[in-house]
Amino acid sequence: MRLPYLLVPLVLIACGGSGGGNRAPAEIDLTASGATAGGNPSVNISLPSGGQVHFVNKDTRPHQISSSNCPELNTAQLAPSADSGLITVTTQGNCTFSDSLNPSNTSYAGNITVLPPGTSGGGY
C-alpha cells in the first residue's frame, strides 16, 4: 500500500529540470543585409548550455554557418528559404560564427555566449 506514496517523490525528482529546458530556441535569421537575432542586426545572444539555436535563411542566396570554436554550430549549406533545424549548443563560453560562403562580410558574423546549464536569463 505504500508504493503509490513512494512513486510520487520519484516522479517529482524525474521531472525536475535544469531550468530553461522549456525555453524557445533562439532564432537567427540570415537576410540579404546580414544576420539578425530578435530583429537586432548585431547578433550577440546568450543561452544556457543545452539551449537551442535555429538558423533560418530568409535570403535569396545560400549561406553556411561555421564556427571554429563551437563545432556544433557548423551547418550544411542552407539554400534560400531553408533552415538548419535545431542545433543544441553545449560548448560553454563564447561561440563565434560567420558565413563561410561570405567570409569577408562581417554582417553575417555573431557571438553566442553559452552559459552553464540551468542558468536563467539570457536571450537576445
Image (cartoon, helix red, strand yellow):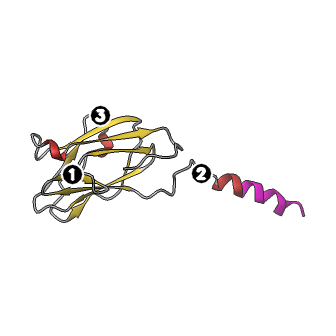
Mark 3, residues whose alpha carbon is within 10 Å: few (<14), some, or many (≥20)? Answer: few
Name the element at disc 2.
loop
Residue type highlighted by circle 1:
Ala
Q: Position of residue 32 (x, y in %)?
A: 12, 57
Q: Main secondary structure of the magenta part?
A: helix
Residue denoted by label 3: 69
- Does the magenta portion include 23? no
Q: Earlier in the sequence, mark 3 or mark 2?
A: 2
Q: Earlier in the sequence, mark 1 or mark 3?
A: 1
Asked whether disc 2 touches disc 1, contact meaning CB atoms under 8 Å apart, the reply is no
Q: Earlier in the sequence, mark 2 or mark 1?
A: 2
Q: Quadrant of residue 8?
A: bottom right
Quarter holding the N terminus is: bottom right
Residue at image point 43% right, 58% down: 24
Near-viewer residue (68 or 2) = 68
Residue type highlighted by circle 2:
Gly
- The vertical placement of 75 against 24, above or below, is above
Mark 2, residues whose alpha carbon is within 10 Å: few (<14), some, or many (≥20)? Answer: few
Asked whether disc 3 touches disc 2, contact meaning CB atoms under 8 Å apart, the reply is no
Name the element at disc 1.
strand
Residue at image point 16% right, 46% down: 107
Whole-angstrom CA distance, mark 1 to mark 3, is 19 Å
Q: Relative to 7, is 54 on the left or the right?
A: left
Whole-angstrom CA distance, mark 3 to mark 2, is 28 Å
Whole-angstrom CA distance, mark 2 to mark 1, is 31 Å
Q: Position of residue 6 (x, y in %)?
A: 81, 56
Residue denoted by label 1: 35
Residue denoted by label 2: 17
Give the residues in magenta.
1-11
